[in-house]
């Protein structure tokens, strides 16, 4: 099995493999599980360690890396659609790591909107600012 995965990574390209099969799936899973936590809390109580596993997943999303790319923006949008950003804003103790990361990103974006770099369009900054409106530092 290890050889098969190695061959797939070699053929696919390791960085692309990680983006497509690790980061994207983690972001999607965290979004779906968070939406379930929000909308169907009765189900969550029936699943052993649901909240603990979800917390671990939140801490392992693509945002662990960065948001200063189109991939980061897509990750933010997926997490937003799943209610993750709102949930973390409302419950900072749920994932202090994610909460602090989102606050930091919101502050960086507020400053960088004044003169964005060439590789990240001004429209992207506005989109990130809107997605992170619930975190201090995102308003200016």
Image: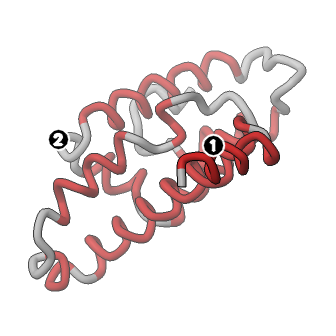
Which of the pair 15/72 is nearer the observer? Answer: 15
- Mark 1 is surrounded, within 10 Å at the Cα level, by few (under 14), some (14 to 19) or many (20 or more) other residues, namely some
Q: Is residue 70 left or right of residue 64?
A: right
Q: What x and y, as percent, mark residue 8?
A: 72, 50
Check the image and report above or below for 32 versus 94: below
Between label 2 and label 1, give the one nearer the viewer.
1
- Mark 2 is surrounded, within 10 Å at the Cα level, by few (under 14), some (14 to 19) or many (20 or more) other residues, namely few
Q: Residue furthest right?
A: 118
Q: Earlier in the sequence, mark 2 or mark 1?
A: 1
Q: What x and y, as percent, mark residue 55?
A: 25, 49
Kindly tell me whether residue 124 is visible in this rendering: no
Q: What x and y, as percent, mark residue 70?
A: 76, 40
According to the picture, the residue beneath numbered tag 2 turns out to be 93
Q: Which mark is residue 18?
A: 1
Which of the pair 40/91 is nearer the observer? Answer: 40
As helix, strand or loop, the secondary structure at mark 2 comes to loop
Q: Is residue 22 left or right of residue 135?
A: right
As helix, strand or loop, the secondary structure at mark 1 comes to helix
Q: Is residue 3 left or right of residue 107?
A: right
The Cα–Cα distance between marks 2 and 1, rounded to whole angstroms, is: 29 Å
Give the quarter of the figure containing the C terminus.
top right
At a point 45% along the width and 23% down the height, the residue shown is 104
At a point 24% along the width and 34% down the height, the residue shown is 96
């Amino acid at each position: 099995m290890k050889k098969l995965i190695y061959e797939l990574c070699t053929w696919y390209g390791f960085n692309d493999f990680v983006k497509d099969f690790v980061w994207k799936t983690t972001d999607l899973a965290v979004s779906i599980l968070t939406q379930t936590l929000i909308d169907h809390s009765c189900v969550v109580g029936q699943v052993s360690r649901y909240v603990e596993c979800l917390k671990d997943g939140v801490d392992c999303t693509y945002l662990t890396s960065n948001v200063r790319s189109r991939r980061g923006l897509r990750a933010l949008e997926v997490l937003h659609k799943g209610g993750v950003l709102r949930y973390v804003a409302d419950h900072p103790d749920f994932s202090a790591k994610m909460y602090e990361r989102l606050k930091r990103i919101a502050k960086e974006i507020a400053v960088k909107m004044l003169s964005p770099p060439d590789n990240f369009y001004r429209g992207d900054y506005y989109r990130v600012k809107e997605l992170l409106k619930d975190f201090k530092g995102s308003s200016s």
